[in-house]
């Protein structure tokens, strides 16, 4: 059953980098363990503006960030010493645990190739038992991820299990995440098997139960294996879900089941106790406020 439709809100990260912000939402904080969804671009910046749009080093705790590109390129550095470029179809899965910092830089013109930079940035909250785990980073090239192409729907399984496929991406709780491309007229039921599921319309138009939904809308479902979508046009849909973890507190880039842990993270960043990425430690984003 369709529980809710969320319209993305426009957010400006500064210097021409604008995003559609989907989660968290006032009436829906999470879908399964997924607690944050941003859709950036597509955007093309002039060479003189690229440096200003860089996302300077900033911290995270209590979550995993999942970076997935539809086009363009992003340069990642983190406090573990990882330096990694991400290209379309690859997955950068960074587990913050007890604390990590990272930067995302844009190199002209590679970052804006293929029609401009277009990035899906999702965060997944960690189970309470894993919130203080050691930070970690893993890069998965597109060639390592399972793909299915049938009945007018191409899909890549980014994480978890769905439609009989299993991703090699290491996760901490039951979840799934799919990138799907639909031909006009294609029909497909949601994978089911999870308590909560959602479909984000990144491009195009789709129909469910006689209603049409468009780019920038998130459809949130319960565990309904009979929920079938039909594409009115060619469409790009990001489909994800999983099992709820319970309430989480969020401040800036920090996620935790405990309010006091958020306060500690704020103090740690302000005091410089969270290391900066080697090779990118000359500037950082200050604690808001």
Image (cartoon, helix red, strand yellow):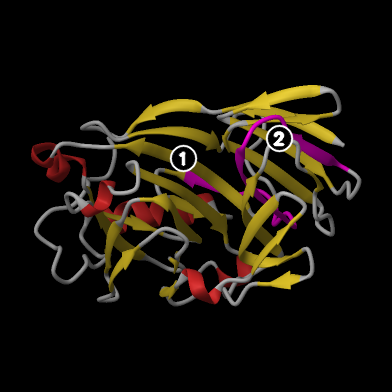
Write the start and end of the magenta stretch as one range.
227-250
Asked if 151 appears above or below 203 in the picture, the reply is: below
Q: Residues within 10 Å of mark 2 (few under 14, many from 20)?
A: some
Asked if 209 appears above or below 58 in the picture, the reply is: above
Q: Nearer the viewer, residue 85 or 263?
A: 85
SS under mark 2: strand
**Horizontal side of residue 23 vs 277, given as left or right:** right
Residue lying at the far right of the rendered structure: 226
Image position, residue 55 (x, y; %) = 25, 48
**Residue 196 got which mark?**
none
Q: Nearer the viewer, residue 151 or 210?
A: 151
Image position, residue 9 (x, y; %) = 49, 25
Image position, residue 96 (x, y; %) = 43, 66
The residue at the point 51 percent across, 51 percent down is 122
**Horizontal side of residue 261 vs 202, given as left or right:** left
**Residue 219 got which mark?**
2
* Mark 1 or mark 2: whose residue is earlier in sequence: 1
Q: Nearer the viewer, residue 102 or 149?
A: 149
The residue at the point 38 percent across, 37 percent down is 41
Residue occupied by mark 1: 39
Report the Cα–Cα distance between label 1 and label 2. 15 Å
SS under mark 1: strand
The residue at the point 44 percent across, 43 percent down is 251
Residue lying at the far top of the rendered structure: 211
Question: Residue 29, located in which quarter of the rendered image?
Answer: top right
The quarter of the image holding the C terminus is: top left
Image position, residue 154 (x, y; %) = 65, 55
Question: Residue 281, located in which quarter of the rendered image?
Answer: bottom left
Q: Residues within 10 Å of mark 1 (few under 14, many from 20)?
A: many
Does any portion of residue 32 appear in the rendered image? no
């Amino acid at each position: 059953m369709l529980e809710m439709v969320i319209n993305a809100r426009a957010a400006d990260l500064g210097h021409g980098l604008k995003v559609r912000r989907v989660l968290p939402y006032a009436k829906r904080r999470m879908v399964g363990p997924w607690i944050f969804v941003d859709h950036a671009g597509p955007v093309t910046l002039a060479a003189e503006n690229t440096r200003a749009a860089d996302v300077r080093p900033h911290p995270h705790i209590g979550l995993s960030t999942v970076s997935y590109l539809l086009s363009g390129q992003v340069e990642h550095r983190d406090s573990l010493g990882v330096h990694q470029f991400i290209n379309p179809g690859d997955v950068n899965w960074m587990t913050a645990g007890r604390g990590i910092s990272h930067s995302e830089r844009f190199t002209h013109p590679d970052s804006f190739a293929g029609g401009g930079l277009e990035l899906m940035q999702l965060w997944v909250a960690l189970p309470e038992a894993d919130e203080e785990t050691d930070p970690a980073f893993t890069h998965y090239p597109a060639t390592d991820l399972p793909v299915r192409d049938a009945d007018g729907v191409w899909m890549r399984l980014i994480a978890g299990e769905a439609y009989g496929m299993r991703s090699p991406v290491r996760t901490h709780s039951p979840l799934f995440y799919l990138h799907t491309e639909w031909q006009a007229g294609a029909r497909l039921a949601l994978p089911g098997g999870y308590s909560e599921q959602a479909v984000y319309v990144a491009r195009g138009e789709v129909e469910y139960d006689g209603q049409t939904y468009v780019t920038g809308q998130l459809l949130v479902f319960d565990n309904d294996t009979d929920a079938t979508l039909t594409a009115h046009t060619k469409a790009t849909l990001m489909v994800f879900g999983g099992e709820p973890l319970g309430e989480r507190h969020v401040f800036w880039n920090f996620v935790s089941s405990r309010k006091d842990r958020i306060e500690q993270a704020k103090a740690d960043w302000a005091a410089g106790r969270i290391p900066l990425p080697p090779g990118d430690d000359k500037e950082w984003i200050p604690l808001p406020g």
